[in-house]
Amino acid sequence: MAKKHVKNTEPKSTKEKNKITRQKIIVGIIVIALLGFFVFNNFIKNKEPEVEYYTFTKEGELTFTDSLGVLKSKIDLEIADNEYERQLGLMNRKEMKENEGMLFIFPVQQLESFWMRNTLISLDMIFVNAQKRIVTIHKNTKILSDTSYPSTEPVMYVVEVLAGFTDKYNIQVGDKIAWMGTRLENSK
């Protein structure tokens, strides 16, 4: 007589049921954790502010001369002559050429102080009085820093150039600056 295979229809033991239930719970927790990670990670990425990087825009030219008027160097200029531009300065710039710089023009001569917050390139800061004579130089400023770089005397202008520029061209306190450009005609 052939034995017939009969499916076991007996109820599973409580132990087996608990094991299957635990496995389902663990798989469910893992799936929820993975979904939560991806949703949270995407949320955080979307919350990071987008940084707008700026590039140089030539708006004039500036010369450095010694106290006798002998030319030491000449650079192309970008101008910061209003509050917004002065606050922004050279922040969020990935690069700048050696022959480029920014001229900050203030409405009145007074003590000024600059910092390097959000500034990605090291600079030389050149503080200049109303007579266009250099009164203070801060060399090789520290990037991404809130360190204060103050003028030692009241100034009306600040020129920022790449770090090392003042050493390379022997720019010193007592030297003078002059500039020209269509946007600058009223700033002289």
Image (cartoon, grey):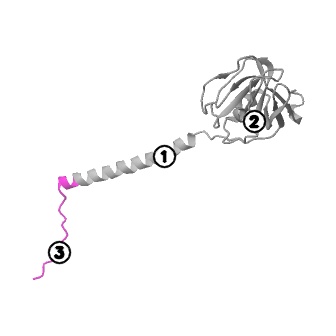
Quadrant position of residue 74: top right
Q: Which residue in the structure is indicated by mark 1?
A: 39
Q: Nearer the viewer, mark 3 or mark 1?
A: 1
Of 134 and 14, the residue lying toward us: 134
Earlier residue among tags 3 and 1 = 3
Prevalent SS, magenta region? loop
| Mark 3 Cα shell of 10 Å, populated few (<14), some (14-19), many (≥20) | few
Amino acid carrying mark 2 in the image: Gly
Q: Are marks 3 and 2 in contact (CB under 8 Å)?
A: no
Quadrant assignment for the N terminus? bottom left
SS for callout 1: helix
Q: Which residue in the structure is indicated by mark 3?
A: 5
Find the magenta span and give its range: 1-17
Question: Outermost residue, bottom direction?
Answer: 1
Q: Nearer the viewer, mark 1 or mark 2?
A: 2
Question: In the image, which disc is placed on residue 101?
Answer: 2
**Residue at (85% x, 32% y) in the render:** 179
Task: Examine the rendered structure and indicate whether residue 41 appears above or below residue 89.
Answer: below
Amino acid carrying mark 1 in the image: Val
Counting every numbered tag in the picture gives 3
Q: Position of residue 125 (x, y in %)?
A: 70, 28
